[in-house]
Each structure stands twice: as C-alpha cells, then as structure tokens.
Amino acid sequence: MDGGTYTLVLERSSDDPIEVGVLGDIDFAAGWYAYTGSALGPGGFSRVERHRAVASGENGARHWHVDYLLGDDATSVATAVTTAADIECGVARRLVDVVGGGVPDFGCSDCDCRSHLVGCVDRAELVAAVERAHSSAADAR
C-alpha cells in the first residue's frame, strides 16, 4: 500500500477566526490541533507534503477544510503520524473521544464522523493520543 491514514499535528500561534469554506468563520484558539485524513488516492502520503506546502505558503490551493486552517499564517505543521491502512474514521473517532469534542463537521463532509479535527493545549499529550489512536484503530481492523 502506497498510502493510508495520516494525522497532522498542527500548532496555532494566535486566536484569530478563519473562514473555512462553506463552514464559515471558525474561531481557532492558539494551541495544538490534530487533523486526520486519508492518503489512499493517487500519490498516497505525498498528500502530507502537499499540506506542508500549503502551510508554508508554497501552495495557495484550497480544496479541503484543512487547507483553510493550514493556509493561515498562524498555523504550522509540527509533525505527521502515518499508518499504511484505511483507518481514517477510526482514528478521528478515537481522537474525538479521548481528546475532546472536536471542531464540528471539520474534515468529515464525506462520512458520518463528528469531526476530523481536535484541539489540545499540550503538544506531548496530543501526539501521544494520536499515536495511540493510530495503533488501536489499526489493531481493530
């Protein structure tokens, strides 16, 4: 498998609202966020590099909800966790359950999840939760 599921760990340095396509303005507090997505299509995990390019300003395209968040100057990609399996929704649901409610409807317009983006004040706590979610979702397959 050339792709699978990824979770980007993002840092926000400000409390500014961001317009996120059809979701409208969303208030994003400064802190840490985890966005879970699928890299099963053409290019596989190169999607992670595309997201890094949006966050660095090298790519101005806005196709997905996360592109609006990444395209804001106050957002950066700290790290990415990947698993070569189709477990996107399993990971996202575990993160919502463990970390907190998530941003309603963010990144999940093609599934029945509540959210594919969760926020946390502590980086280490969030990264550990992401790694556990990937491991437990992969084990549950």
Image (cartoon, rainbow, N blue to C red):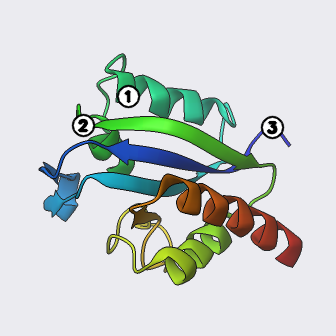
Q: Write down the residue under mark 2.
A: 74
Real-space Cα distance between discs 3 and 2? 31 Å
Q: Secondary structure at mark 3?
A: loop
The mark closer to the camera, 3 or 1, is 1
Relative to 102, is 110 on the left or the right?
right
The mark closer to the camera, 2 or 1, is 2
Real-space Cα distance between discs 2 and 1? 12 Å
The circle drawn on residue 2 is 3
Kind of residue indicated by mark 1? Val
Question: Residue 121 placed where, x, y %?
Answer: 39, 61
Q: Residues within 10 Å of mark 1 (few under 14, many from 20)?
A: many
Q: In terms of depth relative to the viewer, which is nearer, 125 or 5? A: 125
Which badge, 3 or 1, is on the more N-terminal residue? 3
What residue is drawn where x is 37% and y is 30%?
55
Q: Write down the residue under mark 1.
A: 54
Which badge, 3 or 2, is on the more N-terminal residue? 3
Question: Residue 6 placed where, x, y %?
Answer: 64, 49
